[in-house]
Image: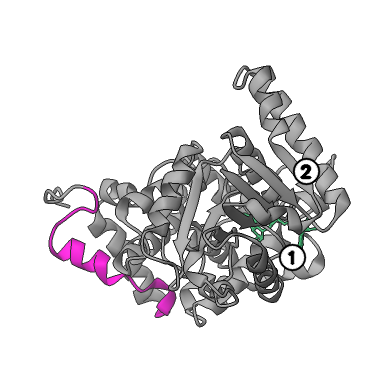
Amino acid sequence: MIIGIIGSGAMGAGIAQVVATAGHTVRLLDQNADALQRASSSIQANLTKLTEKGKLSADDAAASFARLRPTRDIGSFIDCELVLEAIVEDLAVKQQLFRELEMLVPPDCILASNTSSLSLAAIASACRQPERFIGIHFFNPAPVMQLVEIIPAVQTRTGLAEEVRDLVQSWGKVPVLTKDTPGFIVNRVARPFYGEAIRILEEGIADVATIDWALTELGGFRMGPFALMDFIGHDVNYRVTESIFASFFYDPRFKPSFTQKRLFEAGYYGRKSGRGFYDYAADAIAPEPNRDEALGRTILHRVLAMLINEAVDALALNVASREALELAMTKGVNYPKGLLAWADELGPATVLQTLDALYDEYHEDRYRASPLLRRVVRQNQLFLRHEPAAQQ
Ligand code: NAI
């Protein structure tokens, strides 16, 4: 299969590596010659690393690299069977690209976008044949992260999502189908990991180091929310939060925080600027957490209850299946467990109690429990196994 990738930045380069290694001929296009050069060098360096680690033979690495054709000429996309764009996150620019592209490629060429936050229906609306358009959303770094969200737009023809899912699976990835709703699965369900942690900080319940300690040491998350936000960068993470909030018609559950907005405005983006929630100066002293187990459990259960509620609500609204939700959070953001499995382990009634207690205290819509969580508790069920829950 001949695959075209447009945009050779962080995502485009990674995706090009994935598909070239999977045996496809890849035409990689960028409007910027330096970006194209950087992408070529980084793919070559990654392939060399894989051979050094014994994950790829030298012959396969050389063959993969030879299948990659960097170009600045969109005319060379004339024989592509699938084109995936990973250019700047701007609706008008993406629409214009698909308008031009559609004049060139064969009529049965699949058109795809790697957008994180735009509506696929809106991008597809620029196409003359929107039924061949679909979202294929990779995670960064694409060669490492297994999850790929597959998002049919309302215009996408029946059956295309399944074809694309099988193709992506043949690349060694874990594809999950999801609806064209803001944040798809991962960027929607993961919001409270950041938002609720910041809220706990703002209320003075605990400091940054203690909250991170509770989530990593007691919860088993690889990184605490503050360390993770500093790693992602507050420029990126704050903008995603704002965009999701607006896309959900300002549902208070997704409300951004002033704490993060101020860091963003100050240019304290996190690791990359030397300061965020933590100080990354060479002589900075890392703050010590308060290792109070009871406090830590309260923090963990509050954040977990919010995350579980988001996953349950996504299930209630048919954003994705149970299996897709579990895979998304374990393979897309490396959570130690799927959130539905976690709900079953804690007991749905315990999760509901935590949320209802928060709701009673704050009277904020943010803490409203999903009707599905309430129903599962009322019927004494679990999310993943259909036997009755143990008596709480
Ligand atoms: P990036 O800024 O690293 O790369 C974008 C590339 O596209 C640049 O090299 C730029 O020169 C090129 N470009 C821009 N407009 C173009 C055009 N009209 N024609 C040809 N090339 C053009 O961006 P990144 O991070 O790779 O993101 C790309 C897309 O992937 C965005 O839609 C983003 O939302 C999405 N995405 C990003 C993730 C991330 O973690 N960075 C994760 C998943 C999706």
- Lower sequence index among marks 1 and 2: 2
Image vertical order of residue 368 relative to residue 197, above or below: below
228 left or right of 252 in image: right
Dot 1: element = helix
The quadrant holding residue 259 is bottom right
Please provide the residue range marked out in magenta. Answer: 363-384
Residue 364 lies in the magenta-colored region: yes
Q: Is mark 2 within 8 Å of ligand 1?
A: yes
Q: Furthest-right residue in view? A: 34
Query: Amino acid under label 2?
Result: Ala
- Compare residues 307 and 58 and report the one nearer the observer: 58
Residue shown at 56% from the left, 35% from the top: 22
Residue shown at 67% from the left, 52% from the top: 5
Crowd class of label 1 (few under 14; some 14 to 19; many from 20; radius 10 Å): some
* Residue under pointer 2: 39
Image vertical order of residue 29 relative to residue 152, above or below: above
Crowd class of label 2 (few under 14; some 14 to 19; many from 20; radius 10 Å): many
Coordinates of residue 3 in the picture (x, y in percent)? 61, 48
Numbered label attached to residue 263 = 1
- Compare residues 270 and 142 and report the one nearer the observer: 142
Residue shown at 62% from the left, 66% from the top: 240
